[in-house]
Image (cartoon, rainbow, N blue to C red):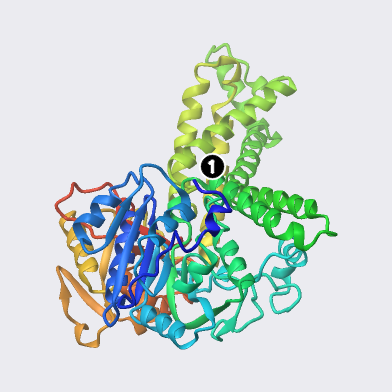
Amino acid sequence: MTTSSDAHRVNDAFPSGDPSCDLTVVIPSYNTRDLMEQALRTVEEASADLSVETIVVDNASQDGSQQMVRERFPDAVLICNEKNLGFAGANNLAFRRARGRHILLLNSDTIVRADTLHTMVSYLDDHPEVGAAGCKVLNPDGTLQLDCRRAFPTPSAAIYKLTGLSRLFPQSRRFARYNLSYLDEDETAEVDALSGSFMLVRRETLQQVGGLDEAYFMYGEDLDWCFRMREAGWKIYYVPTTQIIHFRGQSGRSRALRVQFRKNEAMAIFVHKHMRQRYRFFPVWLLHAGIIAYSLYAFLKPLARRLLLPLVDAALLVMGLWLGIALRYHPTLEPVIHAIEGLSRRLGIDVEPTRWLQPPAYSEAQWLLVYAAPVAIWLLTLALLGLYDRRRFAPGRAALGVGLGFAVIITTVFFFKDYNFSRLAAAAAWGCNTLLVAGWRWSARQLSGGSTGRLGRRRILVVGTDETAESLVSAVAAWHGLDCQLVGLVSTESHERGGVLGPYPVVGLVEELPDLVEEYDIDELVFTATSVSLALHHATARSARLRLRMVSGTVDRSDPAPDSIDALPLIDIRPGA
């Protein structure tokens, strides 16, 4: 790994290139095979009127990424690393081999629009004072990724960001300075920094400033690079006349804690490297403390969200168990108990029904176990049935989970005689908890306009009729529908309306999506890479319960049938209710 000073060596590291090559697209890769395939395809489609070379630098992926590039994109230059060199290290390797007049940093989890490369290359050609430019970078749901244009984290900007003032006052030039949210997202503007997910850099800028600083393993290197460009006198521009879609963080989604650590590390490096000398009279340690505090908040926030539903259920289960025990020993049962006592005497049966009117004389620790153990069993059965994952708002499945938990509890207490004090109390708790745990989910669905009471049979529309859509629907048909009901397809071309693709009809056009969702009572929309940018905005205004996903690769019908459609290469755009 090179040091920070090594990254500033220029002429010997980065040659002049080939003037006949308009653009070198550099894509670092780490375990994003399916996403990278669609990124490479969209780059091919966007390269039609340019001389473009593509360099893929694979950081020791284990998911078949290297083989996929060799087989499906033989014209791409593939550099295979034996270990993960990080984002900066991978890009610097490609920079030393790049021939283009301009170099594009592009993430592997992106979709490039057909006009993007031409638009951005033309912009740099027409503005020789601009060293780097970035386009509009969108989330899959069509919203702007704020870090595609931003300011440097000066002490004041960092404080406004870390304290949340920038979020509270997004239109304030003072408080929203870091993410520049006060700017019109459709207006070209000079900015401090761009996102490394899409950054077009002039070769002369690269030669003067040097490559990315490899002290940053992951995150922050783009901010550092832009800082050095600005110090060297180059302008940096946000150009929203074209756009890409970025599926943020796909290569690190299974390593959330490590990713958060890398973000904090990168910000600490930037502050130490660039802010310490510039703001010598400002207590830089205060920024480091803020970074640590913000990282704790960022780590605990998703954890709190994941625990919210189990905590709600736990509170309701305790309440239901208390109600069950209270009903069992309620005074209104006294006449029934005395009648049983009289009948037993006449029959000569030696029982003491009157003791049934009094709850067991347990200690506090024993009562704690009486409540804690059944609640834990119920929570476990609910979790195993997916109530804290995909089916979190499924009332029928919640009722099933409470019933299964009740069966486990009755079976368990049979082996612990001291706690087998009343099956009637357990049965009453079963009824109460069914009403509470399933009831609140049913109410939430009704309030949100949800009508998806069918367990395991989601009604799906596929948006797009391209090769990817054809492979998906043919596979679903061959696998007899899996656990979904594929209603049909939605096309971007008017002449395809009323046609069929495989066994499924083309039921309408993308501009009709809101009406089609309502007419066919759709639970989920599945987009293809080519349709998502054209059709997504038609769907995002619908009810929040509508799930939106995208096919991230081809589906082979000859493969063994999976257990669920969720096992296919589908990426969540919006999870839905």
Q: Say which residue appears at 26% left-offset and 80% top-offset.
A: 48
Q: What is the x, y in percent for residue 299?
A: 62, 48
Mark 1 neighbour class, 10 Å CA radius: few under 14, some 14 to 19, many 20 or more: some
Quick check: 322 left or right of 567? right
Could you say which quadrant of the image residue 452 lies in?
bottom left
Q: Position of residue 104 (x, y in %)?
A: 42, 69
- Which sits in the foreground, 165 or 148? 148
Q: Which residue is more in the foreground, 254 or 188?
A: 188
Q: Nearer the viewer, residue 336 or 219?
A: 219
Residue at which label 1 appears: 431
Three-letter residue code for mark 1: Gly
Q: Position of residue 433 (x, y in %)?
A: 56, 43
Is residue 359 in view from this perspective?
no
Q: Is residue 16 found left or right of 66 in the rendered image?
A: right
Element type where label 1 sits in the image: helix
Q: In the displayed orientation, state which residue is furthest to the front.
A: 12
- How many numbered marks are there? 1
Q: Residue at x 53, y 52 (%)?
A: 214
Q: Above or below — where is 424 with respect to 482?
A: above
Q: Residue at x 64, y 31 (%)?
A: 371
Image height check: is 100 above or below 423? Answer: below
Q: For this view, does 546 lie left or right of residue 34?
A: right
Q: Of residues 384 and 540, which is closer to you in this image?
A: 540
Indicate left or right for 345 with 472 as reference.
Answer: right
Residue lying at the far right of the rendered structure: 281
Q: Is residue 376 in view? A: yes
Residue 242, given in percent of the width and then of the height, sits at 44, 82
At 55% from the left and 48% from the top, the residue drawn is: 437
